[in-house]
Each structure stands twice: as structure tokens, then as C-alpha cells.
Image: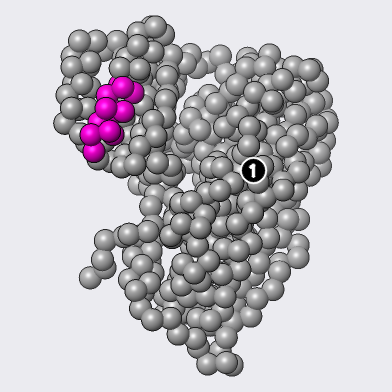
């Protein structure tokens, strides 16, 4: 029987670089353990990509050594968006893909996650088998069985062409002036080519990664610079990715941020009008109530899952639907690819601009967002704080007093040591007051833990 998973979370293994398990020593052992499990499954090739943070080469090199010591061949991609690794794993016929990235987190964090041969998240059962082997002594196969490692030279070009192929072929982007924010991350040498080769006049910002500036006041989590650039350059819109390219947010020509919920609405509405939606749409507990109401008007089924793209994907597969996503900009278009992909999601938005000849500002108006406050409270043990009886009591009291005027959600982040406090409703002052009451309750509980 498999032991409970100690390292793998909802999005692989994450943590602070240099602190177990995000160390070279652990990555070496992880590569070996994964290699042993995959070798048992009769699999022989691994694809490894990474984002641009300074620790990426250290961890990918350690993983490479672990895999080849277990007898698997390795194809190295270098800096590459996470969804590109998923695509290339399928494209080259590899049996597993590995990404060294901490997505939207600061440079000093990092993580390791796996894709199956189908370009999807590795099954839980395989992750459990890998964890079971981590406690075993590391061995090396016979010298003639050691794996080989080489760079896949045309990796970027393959992925660029794949992305372009998801854009409606009857249109081009020649009429659009676009600002692209690459977050000094893994899209820096990919996204500019995709959009310019489709005809756009592209101005690129935050395209000079140095190992330390990934997501640093830029990208999808910090859109202010993009907003300023769109307005100052009088651009039609702006597009911002996160550090590993699986998230995207837009800025319209008026400088207003268009988040993942609004983008998901635009794509779903386009699919609905074109008759290709296939069922409904999946969101999460954090999805804006306005999104749910907009879909209700269109009679599009909508379901919520726990926060995390793994849960969104599970719901899509269970319902045999195509579209799902999160307010963060992690959008899954299963008719185009197998995982959340910022560039491909952006292209679906741009296709709709071309098809309708409308601005993004006009397209997003079909969804009226409810006021929403989202605050992050640093804690050591988020799960314990969220389940604290005093915190639960305060939530119950607030919900009883305010009845249906607000929607409250507290959750422990799966990627950062924080509790996320979300309050949503029609009255901005009321939800802000409620949110700050909850933040204080979380802080009090954290001190008492």
C-alpha cells in the first residue's frame, strides 16, 4: 500500500530554494526515484524544461543526473513555458515531462512537477510510487544502461508553430498594437514570435530575465506597468503572462485589467455563439459570482471546484467539457491543448476580437463582476488556521448576520505559506469591512497556533 503523499501537492513539489525538498540533493533522488518507477512501466525518455529563475539549472541538472542513473534518456529544453513542456512531451513521444518552476512565485522559490506521456498531470498513483521509492538507497544501473542526455535544439520553434495553429486561420493580427509583458519568465523568447508572426505590432516589456527578476513587479500578478504601457503607447490591448506561461491576464485599451474570470467568459461566449462549446464551463470556489450569473443568462452550465487547475481539469474530464479556468488567468481549453496555456488562451481571445471586430472592452461587458476583496495573510500552518474553531465561529456569525449579502471563502494556499481571505458581494464597503474582520481573526488564530 502507498504511504500518504508527503511531497506532491496540487501542483507538484514546491518550496523555498535551498530548503528541503527544493535542494539539489533531493532533486537528484527524485529524478532517480521517478526514473525507477517509469522504467518499471517500460518507459525510457524524459523531457525536462524550466523557467528563468536562478535555481533552475541546478535543479534540472540534478534531476537529469537522477534520471540517467536510473537508465532513462533525457531531452533538455532549457527555459520553456510549462505548457510547452506538456506539448513537447507528447510531440516527441516522450513518456514523461518535468518542469522546474514555481510559476508566479518570487525567484527564491522553485518547484518540480511532472506531465504524463499525454501531456497531462501525472496520475496520483504514479506520484505515490515515486514517493515510496524516495526512502530507498539510491543505486545506479550498469554502465551500458545509463541514459543519455541531449538538448532538443528546435524545441522553441515547434511550440511556436503549435501555438499559432490554434489561432483562427481566416484572421490575422495586423490591425492590432499589443503590449506583451513576459514577466522576465519562460515566455520571453516564445510569446513575441507567436504574436508578431501572426501580424501584430508587438511591443515587449519585461523580456530580459537575469535569474532574479522573474515575476518581480511585472507579469500577470503585477499588471500596473502593463496598464501604464498600454495607455502611454495607445495600444489596443496588453497581455501579461506569469513566470512559467500557464497564466495570462489582459489589459484593455482603456487600461482596465481583464482577469481570468472575464477572459473565460469571453472565450465561453465565443464558443457558445460558434456552437462548439460542448457542455458547460468549470470554475472554482474563487470564481467571481458575476461569472456564474453571466453563464446563467446564456444557459451555459457552470460548476465550481476547489481552487487549483488539477481540480478544474478533473471536473472537465468527468463532465466531458472543454473549458475551465480561474480568476488568476489559468485557463484550460481542452479542444486546443492538454493543460492551462497562457499563450493559447490569449490567442482565443484575439481570435474573438478578429471575428467580432469588437474591442476587448466591449466583449467583457457581458459579464458584470461583483465586488471582490482578496487578501493574503502570511501563516505557518494555513490548514490549521482555516480549521480553527474560533475562525469558523466568526465566519458562521458573519454569514448569519449578513445572510446573502456576501460570499465568504477562506482557504490555505497550496503554493504559498498564506491563508487567502476572499469576500464577495454588491456593497464594496461591506465586503471590505468583512474581509478585514476575517483577516484579524486569521492573524489571531495564527498567533495562537
Instruction: Name the element at disc 1.
Output: loop
Which residue appears at 30% of the width and 17% of the height?
A: 437
Most distant residue in the front direction: 447
Which residue appears at 26% of the width and 61% of the height?
A: 4
Task: Classify residue 57 as left or right of residue 315.
Answer: right
Seen from the viewer's position, the closer of residues 88 and 4 is: 4
Toward which corner of the image does residue 428 lie, by quadrant? top left
Toward which corner of the image does residue 134 lie, by quadrant? bottom left
Provide residue 196's location: percent of width, then percent of height.
81, 38
Provide residue 125's location: percent of width, then percent of height.
34, 64
The stretch drawn in magenta includes residue 176: no
Residue 38: tell me if it is visible.
no
The residue at which mark 1 appears reads as 214
Provide residue 436's location: percent of width, then percent of height.
35, 17
Provide residue 350's location: percent of width, then percent of height.
68, 30
In this picture, is 448 found above or below 298? Answer: below
Quadrant, the N terminus:
bottom left
Residues rendered magenta in the picture: 438-449
Amino acid at each position: 500500500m502507498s504511504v500518504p503523499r508527503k511531497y506532491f501537492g496540487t501542483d507538484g513539489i514546491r518550496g523555498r530554494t535551498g530548503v528541503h525538498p527544493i535542494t539539489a540533493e533531493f532533486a537528484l533522488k527524485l529524478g532517480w526515484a521517478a526514473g525507477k518507477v517509469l522504467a518499471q512501466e517500460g518507459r525510457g525518455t524524459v523531457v525536462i524544461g524550466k523557467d528563468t529563475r536562478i535555481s533552475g539549472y541546478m535543479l534540472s541538472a540534478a534531476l537529469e543526473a537522477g534520471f540517467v542513473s536510473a537508465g532513462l534518456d533525457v531531452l533538455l529544453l532549457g527555459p520553456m513555458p510549462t505548457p510547452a513542456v506538456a506539448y513537447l512531451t507528447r510531440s516527441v513521444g516522450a513518456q514523461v515531462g518535468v518542469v522546474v518552476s514555481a510559476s508566479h512565485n518570487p525567484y527564491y522559490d522553485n518547484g518540480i512537477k511532472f506531465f504524463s506521456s499525454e501531456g497531462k498531470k501525472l496520475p496520483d498513483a504514479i506520484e505515490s510510487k515515486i514517493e515510496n521509492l524516495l526512502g530507498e538507497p539510491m543505486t545506479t544501473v550498469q554502465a551500458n544502461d545509463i541514459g543519455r542526455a541531449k538538448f532538443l535544439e528546435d524545441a522553441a520553434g515547434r511550440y511556436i508553430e503549435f501555438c499559432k495553429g490554434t489561432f483562427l486561420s481566416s484572421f490575422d493580427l495586423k490591425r492590432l498594437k499589443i503590449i506583451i509583458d513576459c514577466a522576465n519568465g519562460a515566455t520571453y523568447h516564445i510569446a513575441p514570435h507567436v504574436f508578431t508572426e501572426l501580424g501584430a505590432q508587438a511591443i515587449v516589456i519585461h523580456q530580459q530575465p537575469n535569474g532574479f527578476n522573474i515575476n518581480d513587479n511585472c507579469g500577470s500578478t503585477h499588471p500596473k506597468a502593463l496598464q501604464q504601457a498600454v495607455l502611454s503607447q495607445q495600444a489596443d490591448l496588453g497581455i501579461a503572462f506569469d513566470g512559467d506561461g500557464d497564466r495570462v491576464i489582459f489589459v484593455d485599451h482603456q487600461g482596465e485589467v481583464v482577469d481570468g474570470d472575464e477572459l473565460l467568459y469571453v472565450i465561453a461566449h465565443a464558443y457558445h455563439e460558434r456552437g462548439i462549446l460542448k457542455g458547460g464551463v468549470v470554475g472554482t470556489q474563487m470564481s467571481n459570482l458575476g461569472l456564474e450569473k453571466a453563464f446563467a443568462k446564456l444557459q451555459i452550465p457552470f460548476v465550481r471546484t476547489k481552487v487549483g487547475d488539477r481540480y478544474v481539469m478533473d471536473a472537465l474530464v468527468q463532465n466531458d467539457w472543454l473549458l475551465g479556468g480561474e480568476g488568476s488567468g489559468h485557463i484550460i481549453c481542452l479542444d486546443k491543448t492538454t493543460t492551462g496555456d497562457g499563450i493559447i488562451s490569449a490567442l482565443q481571445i484575439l481570435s474573438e476580437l478578429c471575428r467580432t471586430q469588437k474591442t476587448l472592452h466591449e466583449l467583457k461587458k457581458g459579464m458584470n463582476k461583483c465586488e471582490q476583496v482578496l487578501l493574503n495573510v502570511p501563516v505557518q500552518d494555513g490548514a490549521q488556521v482555516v480549521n480553527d474553531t474560533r475562525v469558523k465561529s466568526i465566519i458562521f456569525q458573519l454569514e448569519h448576520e449578513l445572510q446573502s449579502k456576501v460570499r465568504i471563502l477562506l482557504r490555505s494556499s497550496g503554493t504559498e505559506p498564506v491563508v487567502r481571505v476572499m469576500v464577495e458581494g454588491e456593497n464594496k464597503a461591506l465586503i471590505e469591512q468583512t474581509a478585514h474582520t476575517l483577516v484579524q481573526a486569521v492573524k489571531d488564530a495564527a498567533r495562537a497556533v
